[in-house]
Each structure stands twice: as C-alpha cells, then as structure tokens.
Image (spheres, helix red, strand yellow):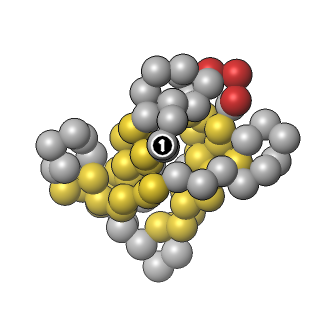
Amino acid sequence: ASTTVGDDTETVFYIDHGLASNKVMVQLFDATGNTVIADVRRGVSDASNTASTDHIKVSFNAAPASDEQITVLIHKIA
C-alpha cells in the first residue's frame, strides 16, 4: 500500500493500508527520494488510539508541506 501525505497543517496522519496485520514495514521518502523520519505506530486508526490491524499512525515534528509530497510505503512482512 502507498499514499502521499503533507498538507502544510497536520502533523499526524492516520493511514488505512488494508493489510489486516500490524506486522508491516513502513518507509517514508520525499519527492527527491530522500528518507523522511517520522514516528510510526502500528495498529492505531484514530486520535482515540482505537486498535486496528488495517491502520498506522504517522507523526511528524513539524507539518509536512503539501509540495513535499512525502510518500508512505507500507508492506506486510508476515
């Protein structure tokens, strides 16, 4: 699964990957291919920390700009 995040405002994104597992590898990179560091929590679907095997929570220290086009790749590993 993959998606792009960044909107100049939000620092937290809840991403639905639909892989029915918390055993996922998450990679983030920007439009130039550089790795982006963020806090990733597996199995969290919303701000209330509702458990889910189909979601991850990605948190940044500062809101990514919309033109940064940060790609989030999510791969099931087991």
Q: Which residue lies most toward the front here?
A: 61
Locate residue 25: give its quadrant: bottom right
| Front residue (pair 6, 26) | 6
Residue 6 percent coordinates (x, y): 56, 28
Residue bearing the label numbered 1: 61
Q: What amino acid type is highlighted by mark number 1? A: Asn
Locate residue 70: give its quadrant: top right
Q: Which residue lies most toward the bottom here?
A: 78
Residue 48 seen: yes
**Which residue is drawn at the image coordinates 52% and 75% (left, top)?**
77
Residue 32 percent coordinates (x, y): 84, 41
Helix, strand or loop at mark 1: loop
The vertical placement of 23 against 60, above or below, is below
Left or right: 5 in relation to 70: left
**Which residue is drawn at the image coordinates 68% and 31% (left, top)?**
69
10 Å crowding of disc 1: few (<14), some (14-19), many (20+): few
**Which residue is drawn at the image coordinates 24% and 41% (left, top)?**
46
Left or right: 20 in relation to 26: left
Count of picture labels:
1
The vertical placement of 31 against 40, above or below, is above
**Which residue is drawn at the image coordinates 38% and 52% (left, top)?**
56
Residue 15 seen: no
Residue 71 percent coordinates (x, y): 65, 42
Residue 47 percent coordinates (x, y): 22, 39
| Front residue (pair 78, 45) | 45
